[in-house]
Amino acid sequence: TDLAQSLIRMGRACVVTGDEGLVTAATSSNQEHSYRVADTTNSVRDLQRDVAYVEQLHKAEYQAVAEERGIWQQPTVRELRSDVVEEVEFQTKASMLQKAWRWIRG
């Protein structure tokens, strides 16, 4: 079992991608010690696996949000990640016509 996926599924962690995923060790007075975590693979196969894995994590997060598990019960977390909450609510409450219209608009 994958630890990250289990934690996300139980609502004990959330998915962070893109710029939110930057790790910084900088202090407020000295920016010279900041660093980034980056994957520098050029292999298409590795990138495809990474994408598939992140999709699995997002699906687990979707379930946790929909069922309000763990951290997703907290109003503060729901406000901070309102984009995720709004998407889950749209997918669970919207009619097929609304979903189709959204898909057409892109």
Image (cartoon, rainbow, N blue to C red):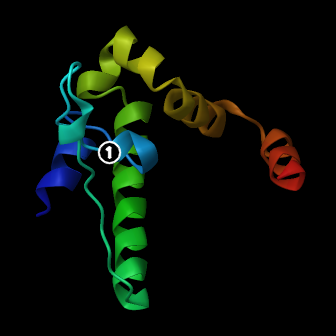
Residue that appears at 72% across and 34% down: 94
Residue sitting at x 43%, y 88%: 44
The residue lying toward the viewer, choosing from 26 and 39, is 26
Q: Is residue 10 visible?
A: no
* Mark 1 residue crowding within 10 angstroms, few (<14) / some (14–19) / many (20+): few
Inspect the image, locate mark 1, and give the three-letter code of the amino acid beneath it. Answer: Leu
Q: Position of residue 71 (x, y in %)?
A: 26, 23
Quadrant for the N terminus in the image:
bottom left
- Report if residue 93 is visible in the image: yes
Task: From this view, report whether residue 45 is shown above or below residue 67.
Answer: below
Residue 46 place in picture, x, y as percent: 34, 83
* Label 1 sits on residue: 22
Q: Pinpoint residue 90: horizontal percent, then vertical percent.
A: 65, 33
46 vs 54: above or below: below
Q: Say what secondary structure mark 1 lies in.
A: loop
Tell me which corner region of the image, top left, top right, bottom left or bottom right, holds residue 57. Answer: bottom left
The image quadrant that residue 10 belongs to is: top left
Where is residue 53? Give x, y as percent.
34, 67
The mark total stands at 1
Q: Is residue 97 left or right of residue 31?
A: right
**Is 28 located above or below residue 54 in the figure?**
above
Q: Please tell me which residue is depicted at 26% across the width and 32% down the height of the picture.
A: 31
